[in-house]
Image (cartoon, rainbow, N blue to C red):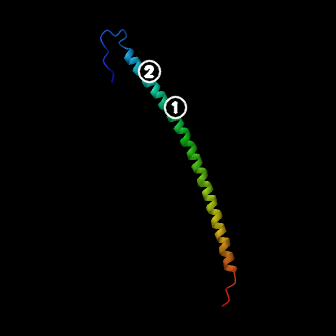
Amino acid sequence: MTAPTPPGDPLPGAAIESELALLEQRLGVLLAHTRALRVANETLRRDLAAAEARNQALSGRVAAAKRRLDALVARLPEPAE
């Protein structure tokens, strides 16, 4: 991974330190993205649960309206021929 240190380099560990600093920076970015994705995922889970609850409530209302309409249609007089 690390390129060989050129002869006469005053700080042979400088390349390693630089690479470690870069990796540390990348890790920090990765952790920040991970945290942001976890927050977004939790928000999406809450939104989905709320949408499912609304959908269930609306389905109940539609079923009740259908029952009322069926009752009204049943009360209509038969057409005269």
At a point 38% along the width and 18% down the height, the residue shown is 16
* Secondary element at tag 2: helix
57 above or below 20?
A: below
74 above or below 25?
A: below
At a point 47% along the width and 31% down the height, the residue shown is 30
Which corner quadrant holds the C terminus? bottom right
51 above or below 62?
A: above
Q: Position of residue 42 (x, y in %)?
A: 56, 42
Between 4 and 32, the residue placed more toward the observer is 4
Q: Position of residue 50 (x, y in %)?
A: 61, 51
Q: CA distance from mark 2 to mark 1?
A: 17 Å
- Residue placed under numbered mark 1 in the picture: 32
Q: Amino acid at mark 2?
A: Ala
In the shown orientation, is residue 22 left or right of residue 51?
left
In the shown orientation, is residue 74 left or right of residue 49?
right
Label located before the other in sequence (2 or 1): 2
41 above or below 6?
A: below
Residue furthest toward the bottom? 81
- Disc marking residue 55: none
Q: Amino acid at mark 1?
A: Ala
Q: Quadrant of residue 54?
A: bottom right
Q: Position of residue 11 (x, y in %)?
A: 37, 10
Q: Position of residue 25 (x, y in %)?
A: 47, 25
Mark 2 near mark 1, Cβ–Cβ under 8 Å? no
At a point 44% along the width and 21% down the height, the residue shown is 21
* Secondary element at tag 1: helix
The tally of labels here is: 2
In the shown orientation, is residue 18 left or right of residue 48?
left
Q: Quadrant of residue 80?
A: bottom right
Which corner quadrant holds the N terminus? top left
- Residue placed under numbered mark 2 in the picture: 21
